[in-house]
Image (tube, rainbow, N blue to C red):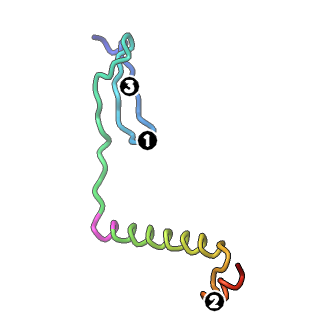
Amino acid sequence: MSDSNRFTIICPCCEATLSIDADTGALLSHEEKHKPLGSFEDMKKDLDKQKLTRGRERYEDLSESPGFGLGRTEARDQR
């Protein structure tokens, strides 16, 4: 099979290289993008950032709910 009978496509999600047969549409080959491994410290920093973001989003969600910041009795009295 010549190269003119196949398409080479880069996946927009995972950036893998796919070779597709032009006639049948069959997947001929798949090659994953090689990703460099990060250091343990870099991964830990990324996790810490994710925790902060999740905590901030959770706080914002709670602060929009009625009765946020009130004690139990105050919140109950508002109902």
Quadrant location of residue 77?
bottom right
Looking at the figure, which quarter contains the N terminus?
top left
Q: Is residue 38 above or below residue 57?
A: above
Q: Is residue 51 above or below residue 18?
A: below
Q: Is residue 2 above or below residue 74?
A: above
Quadrant location of residue 50?
bottom left
Circle 1 is placed at which residue position? 13
Q: Which amino acid does the dot numbered 2 rest on?
A: Thr
- Is residue 39 found left or right of 72 in the rendered image? left
Camera-side residue of 50 and 45? 50
Circle 3 is placed at which residue position? 8
Circle 2 is placed at which residue position? 73
Camera-side residue of 69 and 9? 69
Nearer-N-terminus badge (2/1): 1
C-alpha separation, residue under disc 3 versus residue under disc 1? 15 Å
How far from the left and from the top, in percent, is residue 10?
Answer: 41, 33
Please state the extent of the stretch shown in magenta in the rendering.
Answer: 39-43
Camera-side residue of 33 and 78? 78
User: Going 35% across and 16% down the picture, which residue do you hit?
Assistant: 21
User: Going 49% across and 69% down the picture, which residue do you hit?
Assistant: 54
Q: Which amino acid does the dot numbered 1 rest on?
A: Cys
Q: Which amino acid does the dot numbered 3 rest on?
A: Thr
**Disc 2 secondary structure class:** helix
Quadrant location of residue 7?
top left
Q: Main secondary structure of the magenta part?
A: helix
Looking at the figure, which quarter contains the C terminus?
bottom right
